[in-house]
Image (cartoon, grey):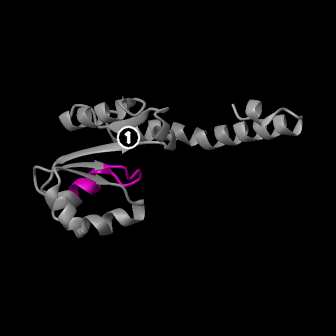
Amino acid sequence: KSNQEVVDKADWVMLAVLPGQAKGVLKELVFRKSHKVLTLVATVPSDTILELIAPCETLCRAVPLPAVADRSCVTIVSPTGSAFTDQVADMFDLLGGSVVAKDDTECAILQATTCLMGPFYRMQQECMSWLRDKGIKQKIGSM
């Protein structure tokens, strides 16, 4: 099936492509005013996406992190004041929780804190390696 066939049959459309692909993918699609679009594309501004999905006016951004797969992290959702955003937040609440940002600017500020995830997990990995090097059993060192 083509992307357009999927869009034609959907009420909600989730955009989950690399930032450099978003414009190319969206310009090939025709949206209805009644569509609700959820973007997971972090660096393309909402205004740009809204231009590309017109006449659709209902857009929500979400920033799920890998730990959402284990239901062990909170997902940033924006903007506030939208019934669709509330629906998306409710969905992510089932997957670990949500924090609703008021707009793209606040979303980007909150998203910046997620950059701490890489060094945090690297430090945990180093600690686990150190424990194993000191003779701690794997079961204890992998907690």
Residue 80: x, y in percent? 27, 32
Residue drawn at the location 47% of the way across and 41% of the way down: 69
Query: Quadrant of the rendered structure where residue 99 is?
Result: top left
In this picture, is 77 found above or below 40? above
Q: Is residue 41 magenta?
A: yes
* Left or right placement of residue 36 versus residue 133 in this view: left
In this picture, is 57 found above or below 22? above
Residue 132: x, y in percent? 83, 38
User: Mark 1 highlights which residue?
Assistant: 105
Query: Quadrant of the rendered structure where residue 4 is?
Result: bottom left
Magenta segment: 39-51
Instruction: Say which quadrant the C terminus sits in.
Output: top right
Q: Would residue 100 be visible to someone looking at this image?
A: no
Q: Would residue 9 be visible to someone looking at this image?
A: yes
* Left or right placement of residue 11 versus residue 2 in this view: left
The amino acid pointed to by label 1 is Thr
Residue 133: x, y in percent? 87, 39
Residue extending farthest right = 134
Q: Is residue 64 magenta?
A: no
